[in-house]
Image: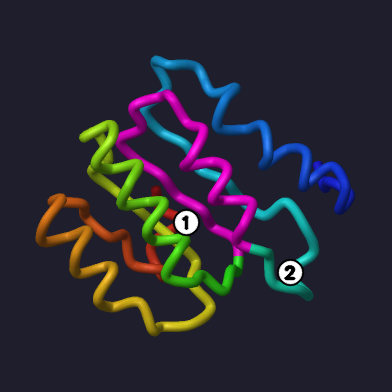
Amino acid sequence: MVLKDSEIDQFYNSLGSHLPLSLKYINIGQLFKPKRSFSTDKFQHLFKNCKASLETIIINQPVEYNDSDFDYIIDYTKKTNSLRFLGLNCLKNNHRLKFKELKEIYNVFIIPKYDLGNW
């Protein structure tokens, strides 16, 4: 299933608040044509509104993340104390400090980009 642009916005704006509380694993695959990158504000809503205690989060879409995106992930990790595995398809490799913080302070295993399809 491929969503239209307006449907993608609506999907991500409401996703976090509609996940079952018992959900432990989420893998968000390709929802659009890979010709363009995806805006990160969609994921901010996911982490900001999510009440489920997710242990594994995989977002296998080409995204140019910024530091505020990682701040939402870190805030979610602090809030739930549940996140153990994180896989992101980052287009740029300039977030080493944020990944390091997630690994060393919060004990989150960062799934390598090349291995996302195996989770």
- 73 w.r.t. 56: above or below: below
On screen, residue 114 versus residue 3, left or right, reads: left
Residue appearing at x 38%, y 84% in the figure:
94
Q: Which quadrant: the N terminus? A: top right
Would you identify the image quadrant in which residue 81 lies? top left
Residue appearing at x 58%, y 43% in the figure:
45
In depth, the one of 9 and 3 nearer the eye is: 9
Callout 1–callout 2 Cβ contact below 8 Å: no
Report helix, strand or loop for mark 2: loop
Which residue bears the numbered disc 1? 117
In depth, the one of 15 and 23 nearer the eye is: 15
* Callout 2 crowding tier (Cα within 10 Å): few <14, some 14–19, many ≥20: few
On screen, residue 19 versus residue 56, left or right, reads: right
Q: Amino acid at mark 1?
A: Gly
- Of the numbered discs in the image, which one, if any, rests on residue 34? 2
* Callout 1 crowding tier (Cα within 10 Å): few <14, some 14–19, many ≥20: few
Real-space Cα separation, disc 1 to disc 2, in angstroms: 16 Å
Which contiguous range is marked in magenta?
40-61
The percent coordinates of residue 30 (x first, y second) are: 67, 55
Q: Amino acid at mark 2?
A: Pro
Whether the magenta-drawn stretch holds residue 28 is answered as: no
